[in-house]
Amino acid sequence: MAVVNQKGGVGKTTTVINLAAGLSLLGKKVLIIDLDPQGNSTSGLGIEKSSLNKSTYNLLIEDMKIDEVIRKIDIKENKKIYICPSNPELSGADIELYDLEEREWILNKALNNSNLDEFNYILIDCPPSLSLLTINAFAASNSLLVPVQCEFYAMEGLAQLNKTINLIIERINPSLEIEGLLLTMFDSRNNICKTVASEVRNFFKEKVLNTLIPKNVKLAECPSFGKCIFDYDQHCIGAISYLDLSKELILKNGGSFVEKISW
């Protein structure tokens, strides 16, 4: 599942990290692939990017096996998240990929050549642009999760993203589906937020997920401490919302979970 929006600052990386953690707490084994050269999923889980000598770059450009790249992150309840981290080298990957044959399929081939059956979910954190890295994520994914910030220009950005997704489905990956649109940074006291949320639901209907991610200071703070929201403040509304999102996505796909979270 690629987590994508061509607009930055919509809660994309926050969603990748905390959805992965929520799924893990519900008994699912989750791998994050950090495909964003900014590496915010990597640093947001407490990994120092500059110290990495193996990253997603090596997976794409040097045909390194994913087993050699994956790092394990411990979170609460003795659960774990696994991540294929990003480092600064990834910023040059777009240029290096350009001259390769079937350049849109490099990530897909790397994943298919690896035994990843142990993972229930693979979440790809995409760059906030339509780059070759993003197209690789589209080609490697079964579905897309689109975080949508509840702000004035949301519909304009979604219209452009919708065109892009339709082109990808038509030309590259016909089996790609939209897992859902996730409304983020919602403030019930803000009339613009409420109006945007209503417009998005009216236009995209059942594609919009039921869970709302609120504007929450704890969600904004936890990346600077290298922690997911459940390790930073498990009782805050942000943590509760991401656990709700995890449950919704599991049930949406016909799965089940056993909730054994001793808070």
Image (cartoon, rainbow, N blue to C red):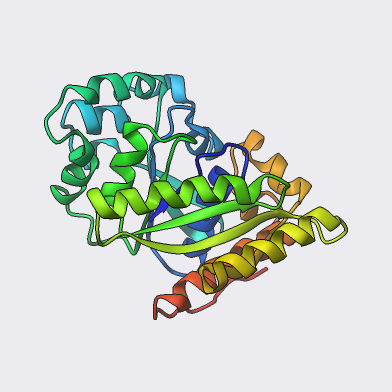
**Quarter of the figure with the C terminus:** bottom right
User: Residue at coordinates 64% horizontally, 48% vertically from top-left?
Assistant: 154
Residue 49, visible in the rendered structure? yes
- Image location of residue 10, percent across then percent down: 62, 44
Q: Is residue 132 left or right of residue 208?
A: left
User: Residue at coordinates 18% horizontally, 38% vertically from top-left?
Assistant: 65
- Image location of residue 115, percent across then percent down: 17, 54
User: Residue at coordinates 18% horizontally, 26% vertically from top-left?
Assistant: 62
Q: Is residue 250 above or below residue 133?
A: below
- Image location of residue 124, percent across then percent down: 39, 47
User: Residue at coordinates 45% horizontally, 73% vertically from top-left?
Assistant: 250
Q: In this view, does 200 lie to the left or right of 167?
A: right
**Quarter of the figure with the N terminus:** bottom left
Q: In which quarter of the image is residue 235?
A: bottom right
The one nearer the camera, 102 or 60, is 102
The one nearer the camera, 244 or 91, is 91
